[in-house]
Amino acid sequence: MRAVLNTLIEELRRLKAAGVRTVAVSSESTASLRAVVVRRAEAEAGGRKLQSENTDRTSALDASSNPVRSPQPVLRAAGGAPSIPPPASRLASPAAATTAALPPPPAVALPAGDKSARWAALRELVLNHPVCLANVRPGKKVVLGVGSLDAKIMFVGEAPGADEEVQGEPFVGPAGQLLTKMIQGMGLKREETYIGNIMNWRPQMPVASGMEQVGNRPPTTEEMAFCLPFLRAQIEVVQPALLVALGKTATDGLLGAGKFKTLGEARGQWHEFAGLPVMVTYHPSYILREPTNRKKRLIWEDLLKVMERCGLPITEKQRGYFLER
Ligand code: URA
C-alpha cells in the first residue's frame, strides 16, 4: 500500500506541476483509500502498533504537506517544449493514470488530392499520432470522425466513451444510437452525415489495476485544444454546410471555453466556427438521462432549424414530433 500511495502522490505532484487542477477519482480508488484510513483507525483504537502502516501515513502526509519534496519533473523535450507524456499503460501505477502534460496543439498540413485521399492521410496521422496513442490504454483505440465526406451536416460530440474506444468509431454506444435515430428523424441516414468529436481519445480516469475505466470525465481545456486541429482538418476535408455542436463540451471546444456559462445560453441559436454556421443543441445523453417528450422536443426544434438551413424537406408530421407531453 505504501508504494501505491507514494506513486499516487508522485503522479498528483506531476500533474500539479503540469497545470492540472482537478483530477477525477473513481469510486473504486476512493474506496481503497478509505479502507486504508479505516484499517488504521481500527488498529489505533485497539492500541495496536502497526509499524508498516504508520510508516505509510508518515510518508503520505509528509509528501502531501510538502509538495516540493522530491518533485517529479514534467517531461520536456530539448528546447523546453513538453514532450510526449508517458502512455497511461506505462505510468508507474495504472491507478494514477489521468491527464498528463500535453505538448502544444499539432499543426496539421493536409496533402493535396481529392477528399478521400486527404481524409485517409488525416486518419493515418491521427490514429498513429504519438500523443493520441499515449492517451489510450492498451487494446483501446484512437477515434476519428466517420461518415460521408460530402456531408452537409457535421455533428460534433464530446469524446469517445467506453464503446467508442473499443470500436474506434464515434457515437456507437447508447448516445450514438439515439443520435442515429435523431438523424433518421430528419429524413437522413447516419452515413449521409459526418459525425466527429472534439476529442480523439477517451479522457482517462484512474482505474484500479486490471480494471476497466468506469464512467467518463469531460476533457480538460488543454486536451480539447490539442485535438482541435484534427477537427479543423476534418472540417477542411468535408466542407460541410454547417456544424451541430452536441452539448456543452462540444460548444466550449468550438466556440471557446468560458464563452457561455450554461448550454442554455447558447442552445437553439446559430453561432460560427471556421466560417461555418454552428447550431448548438443538447447532447443525446441529456435525453437518455430523462427521456421525456419535453426534452426531445427541445433538441428537435434545434434540428428543425438545421433542416431548414440545409434546405431539407420538412413534412407536417416532422414539424409536430414530440409535441404531445
Ligand atoms: N458521446 C460523445 O460525445 N461522443 C461519442 O463519440 C460518444 C458519446
Image: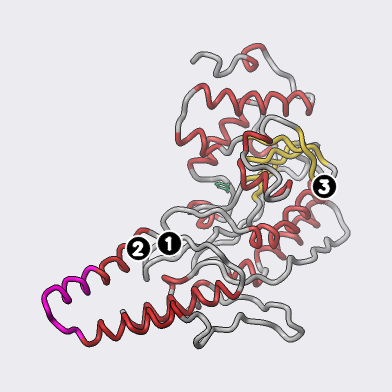
What segment carries the magenta color?
38-50
Which picture quadrant has residue 53?
A: bottom left
Name the residue type under label 2: Thr
The answer to whether the residue labelled 2 contacts the one labelled 1, judged by CB atoms less than 8 Å apart, is yes
Q: CA distance from mark 2 to mark 3?
A: 42 Å
Where, by quadrant of the figure, is residue 96 drawn?
Answer: bottom left
Q: CA distance from mark 1 to mark 3?
A: 36 Å
Which residue is tagged 3? 274
What kind of colouring is applied to the model shown? secondary structure
Residue sitting nearer the eye, 214 or 220 = 220
- Assess whether mark 3 and mark 2 are in contact (beta carbons under 8 angstroms): no
Q: Secondary structure at mark 1?
A: loop
Residue 87 position (above or below residue 229): below
Distance, label 2 to label 1, CA atoms, is 7 Å
Density class for disc 2 (Cα within 10 Å; few <14, some 14-19, many ≥20) is few
Q: Which mark is residue 25?
A: 1
Q: Percent from the top left, x then y, of residue 234? A: 75, 52
Q: Position of residue 281 (x, y in %)?
A: 64, 34
Q: Is residue 146 in view? A: no
> Residue 319 lies in magenta, yes or no?
no
Q: Amino acid at mark 1?
A: Val
Disc nearer the start of the sequence (1/3): 1
Left or right position of 109 against 316: right
Identified by mark 3, the residue type is Ala
Q: Position of residue 266 (x, y in %)?
A: 68, 36
